[in-house]
Image: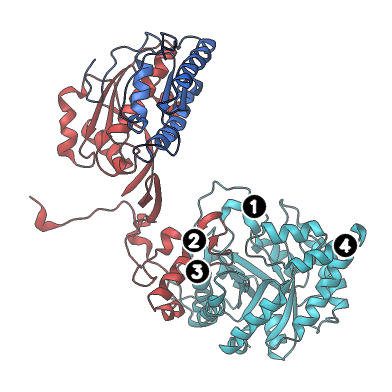
Chain colours: A blue, B red, C cyan
């Protein structure tokens, strides 16, 4: 289809949005991203039955954490689309990019020193 | 298990205000199971703290460590080699663990990152419910296996009070009446005749009212 | 006769008892009690004085009882287990005995969550049934709960409350049985609106023979308005107001509603008097004490026997 979508969107591939835990999202923000969105399968069509529904709940929870932290939950969203919806994928990428641009850069950009993993190692 | 609840980020940030180097200690036991103070929660809290400080342009260095238990000194000893590198310890174990860490490192300030709430069970993933208050004199054999001390809002030994309505407690429409649960269970066990017995006034000396408690087993001591 | 209680005396002579209640003020002004007392003069045999009802701080039941006693009433000291441990409870019972309070009503007490100090720590060292037994042991055995001897026994007529409409319904008579076994001599019930359920409860009480060992005083509360009726139905724990009663209140013009409320109350009393085992009426006119005389008069409860 050779559809265009903004180049600022970096894709992290996971087998299922059910794999995305809160820590993964928070670490992305620590590394300086301005926003994160999850592109999961359509609701009711998860290959692992409930992966995308669990991701939805985690996103809701992580939004609250981001509000508490002061980054704002609006920098995080969950979208659902099927693998056949290339148009929709590009559309969401543009929509999210616009939204984050409007919010401006993350206030923590390049400020978190030594991003560590859970074993305490500096990456 | 002992169930705890994470304190709000705001409260933790306030406690941590004077400090830049923090040793964040989780515990692999109860608080891991109730998702309040295990390794994952250590990671999330550390990340929240770093993001929040960074947003305000302030530094923070956090060492993340989760001990097997914070209520046994062998495990607390594991942080001895580097505890001196940090200004303060933030513990998200239960109240017992938080205190015991402080007892072992007497010159270190140990801050609580959770509110320890109750002894309970997992009703379903993500839902925990109180069952026991550790009163020191169990009456479950008399009350159909349901505790009136922990599960009646008034701890009535001869309930239910006049506020029991449709199986719910007067305190909260979502809260089961402990005495309704007792009576239902007595019926299931064919023991409803037990309800006719008056349970006499309780001896609270075995509870916290008798002062802090201690348990001893001579044969196990070294 | 075990005590100097006016209600015990009337019950022993086979009479029908009328009691009412007086809620102490949220302040230190004794005139409020005296004013309410004056409205009840010659209308009732004894007056309940509530103990920080609905967990809202008020003048103590004990001191309000003394004010009413000075006016010539036979007060009923209400005592809840929420705010006192067994030490304070026994101490207050001795004080009541010393100052000539002849009646006590033993209650668990509303949870503090409903009151003006929801952050308070509650006590509940003992429960209402254990409190009944505590008074009995002090009075009849002359012993403290700790086992020591009481020098100068407090002589109080022992009462309790019971809610026939609370759940589980099937054990409500059994629970009354436990109160009687613990030493309870009179019961005042929760406000009765659901006559059918109350009748059924009384049947259960009679089946156990409890009405012969303990006097049942049936509780009534007049509605001031349809709003109050709805509030009682929806917001007061353990209250059973049938829809028909709300409809009846709704059916009359607003300015006639309080009159209708009184009418319902009087009819209720007349029906209650017909139920075997009901030995008296407890009129709880909440912040409406001026209507107690009218209700008692219309229900044919006056004049009261001389003290």
The reply to whether callout 1 and callout 2 are in contact (CB within 8 Å) is no
Q: Disc 4 on helix, strand or loop?
A: helix
Give the crowd class for mark 2: few <14, some 14-19, many >=20 residues within 10 Å: many
Q: Is residue C209 left or right of residue B149?
A: right
Residue C257 image label: 4
Question: Visible in this render: residue B18?
Answer: no
The quadrant of the rendering that contains the N terminus of chain C is bottom right
Q: Quadrant of residue B21?
A: top left
| Residue underneath mark 3 | B159
- What's the chain of the residue with tag 2? C
- In 3D space, how far apart are the residues under numbered discs 4 and 3 (Cα atoms)? 37 Å
The reply to whether callout 4 and callout 1 are in contact (CB within 8 Å) is no
Q: Is residue A106 left or right of residue C164?
A: left
**Eye-nearest disc, 1 or 3:** 3
- What's the chain of the residue with tag 3? B
Q: Earlier in the sequence, mark 1 or mark 2?
A: 1
- In 3D space, how far apart are the residues under numbered discs 1 and 3 (Cα atoms)? 25 Å
Q: Is residue A83 left or right of residue B216?
A: right
Q: Position of residue A77 (x, y in %)?
A: 47, 24
The reply to whether callout 4 and callout 2 are in contact (CB within 8 Å) is no
Q: Position of residue B172 (x, y in %)?
A: 55, 54
Residue C124 image label: 2
| Residue underneath mark 1 | C57
Give the crowd class for mark 4: few <14, some 14-19, many >=20 residues within 10 Å: many
**Eye-nearest disc, 4 or 1:** 4
The reply to whether callout 4 and callout 3 are in contact (CB within 8 Å) is no
Viewer-proximal residue among C263 and B166: B166
């Amino acid at each position: 289809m050779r559809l265009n979508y903004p180049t600022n969107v970096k894709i992290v591939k996971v087998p299922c949005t059910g794999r995305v835990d809160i820590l993964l999202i928070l670490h992305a923000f620590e590394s300086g991203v301005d926003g994160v969105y999850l592109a999961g399968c359509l609701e009711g069509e998860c290959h692992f039955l409930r992966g995308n529904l669990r991701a939805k709940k985690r996103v809701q929870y992580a939004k609250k954490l981001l509000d508490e932290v002061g980054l704002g939950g609006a920098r995080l969203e969950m979208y659902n689309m099927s693998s056949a919806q290339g148009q929709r994928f590009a559309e969401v990428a543009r929509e999210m990019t616009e939204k984050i641009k409007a919010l401006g850069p993350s206030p923590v950009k390049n400020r978190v020193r030594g991003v560590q993993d859970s074993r305490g190692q500096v990456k | 298990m002992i169930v705890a609840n994470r304190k709000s980020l705001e409260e933790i940030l306030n406690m941590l205000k004077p400090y830049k180097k923090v040793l964040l200690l989780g515990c692999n036991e109860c608080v891991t199971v109730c998702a309040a103070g295990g390794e994952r929660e250590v990671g999330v809290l550390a990340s929240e703290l770093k993001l929040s400080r960074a947003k305000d342009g302030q530094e923070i260095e956090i060492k993340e460590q989760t001990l097997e238990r914070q209520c046994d000194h062998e495990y607390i000893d594991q942080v001895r080699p580097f505890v001196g590198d940090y200004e303060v310890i933030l513990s998200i174990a239960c109240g017992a663990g938080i205190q015991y860490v402080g007892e072992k490192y007497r010159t270190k300030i140990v801050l609580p990152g959770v509110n320890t709430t109750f002894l309970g069970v997992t009703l379903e993933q993500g839902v925990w419910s109180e069952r026991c208050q550790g009163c020191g004199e169990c009456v479950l054999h008399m009350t159909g296996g349901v505790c009136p001390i922990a599960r009646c809002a008034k701890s009535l030994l001869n309930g239910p009070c006049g506020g029991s309505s449709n199986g719910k407690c007067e305190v909260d429409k979502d809260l089961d009446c402990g005495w309704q649960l007792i009576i239902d269970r007595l019926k299931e066990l064919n023991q409803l005749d037990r309800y006719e017995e008056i349970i006499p006034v309780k001896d609270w000396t075995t509870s916290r009212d008798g002062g802090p408690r201690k348990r001893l087993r001579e044969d196990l001591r070294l | 006769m075990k005590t100097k209680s006016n209600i015990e005396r009337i019950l022993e002579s086979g009479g029908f008892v009328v009691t009412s209640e007086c809620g102490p003020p949220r302040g230190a002004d004794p005139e409020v009690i005296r004013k309410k007392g004056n409205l009840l003069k010659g209308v009732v045999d004894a007056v309940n004085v509530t103990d920080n009802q609905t967990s809202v701080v008020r003048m103590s039941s004990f001191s309000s009882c003394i004010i009413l006693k000075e006016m010539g009433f036979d007060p009923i000291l209400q005592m809840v287990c929420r705010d006192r441990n067994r030490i304070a409870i026994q101490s207050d019972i001795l004080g009541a005995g010393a100052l000539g309070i002849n009646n006590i009503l033993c209650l668990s007490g509303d949870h503090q969550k409903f009151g003006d100090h929801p952050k308070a720590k509650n006590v509940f060292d003992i429960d209402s049934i254990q409190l009944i037994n505590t008074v009995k042991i002090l009075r009849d055995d002359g012993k403290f709960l700790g086992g020591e001897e009481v020098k100068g026994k407090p002589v109080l007529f022992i009462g309790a409350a019971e809610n026939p409409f609370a759940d589980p319904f099937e054990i409500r008579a059994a629970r009354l049985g436990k109160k009687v076994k613990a030493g309870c001599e009179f019961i005042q019930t929760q406000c009765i609106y659901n006559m059918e359920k109350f009748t059924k409860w009384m049947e259960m009480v009679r089946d156990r023979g409890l009405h012969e060992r303990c006097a049942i005083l049936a509780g009534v509360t007049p509605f001031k308005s349809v709003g109050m009726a709805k509030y009682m139905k929806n917001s007061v724990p353990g209250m059973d107001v049938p829809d028909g009663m709300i409809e009846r209140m709704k059916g009359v013009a607003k300015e006639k509603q309080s009159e209708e409320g009184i009418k319902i109350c009087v009819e209720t009393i007349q029906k209650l008097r017909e139920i075997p085992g009901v030995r008296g009426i407890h009129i709880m006119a909440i912040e409406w004490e001026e209507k107690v005389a009218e209700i008692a008069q219309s229900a044919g409860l006056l004049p009261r026997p001389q003290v």
